[in-house]
Image (cartoon, rainbow, N blue to C red):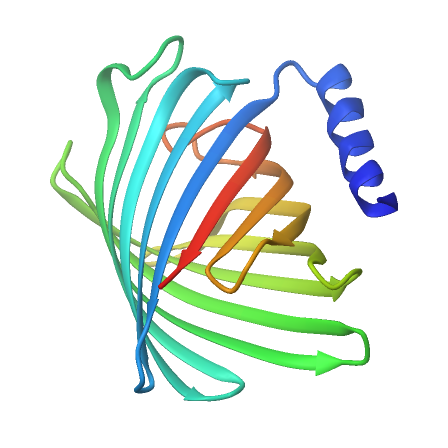
Amino acid sequence: MRATFLIFSILISNSLIAQSLGSWNVIDLKKSTKTKYSYQLEAQLRSLKFYQDFHYNELNFTANYKYDNNLVLSVLIGKHNTYTEGGNFTSPIVRDEFRLSVQASTVQKFGIFNLDNRYRIEQRYFVNDNSLSYRMRYRFGLKNKITKYNNLQFSNEFFLALGDKNSTFEKNRFLIGITNTFSKRYEVQLNYLNQIDNRKNDESGSNFLQFVNILNF
């Protein structure tokens, strides 16, 4: 209860001092197998205001290989659309993008905390101008089990655009939230996400209430 109160206090305080609090909605469908392979389908829908001005959606498919209990290797394919700000899916599309990514995730346990590190390299193809770019992402996260069914989580992710000559800091995402596990097949996350973005034509927005549904099959 104290963790839940803390998160809602952060959300309410932020919504008062920020210009707007957007919504960030995620549905994850995860399929495990009897082998080391697993699969995931994820859909996202984002708005710049609280369930208004929807300007972004994405759909990702991920194939995972569990090398051991601490390392998972993944390949991701995604479609990402960024629309003009000021309304719901307002034309023209600012970014019509396909992504192909490779990823490595590690997990270690330190006392009451689970530490995870995620390393991702993305190849981004932009349909608008028929161009390619590359990006490296690193996410550091901590989780702490506060009750039998609830976890408190924190993460911070850095984005680095990779160029022919120089690498440029692109954005940073900070997240804090709580996970409620209803069963082995279903869990929900409620998070506050703050984003610092240096890219004028990329997905924008600074402060979001993130609602994540995860279904395991």
Q: Among all residues in the image, which is located at the extreme right?
A: 2
Residue 158 horizontal side relative to residue 61, left or right: right
The one nearer the camera, 200 or 174, is 174
Give the number of callouts.
0
Q: Residue at x 70, y 18 (%)?
A: 18
Quarter in which the N terminus is drawn: top right
Task: Choose top left, top right, bottom left or bottom right for residue 144.
Answer: bottom right
As drawn, the residue found furthest toward the front would be 183
What residue is rendered at 47% in x and 45% in y? 213
Q: From the viewer's perspective, is residue 140 above or below residue 213?
A: below
Rendered-image quadrant of the C terminus: bottom left
Residue positioned 14% across, 37% down in the render = 127
Please determine whether, in this image, residue 137 is positioned above or below residue 20. below
What residue lies at 70% left-to-right and 58% top-to-bottom? 151
Q: x%, y% of residue 146? A: 80, 60
Residue 152 image offset from top left, x and y in percent: 73, 55
Q: Nearer the viewer, residue 128 or 69?
A: 69
Above or below: residue 67 compared with residue 179: below
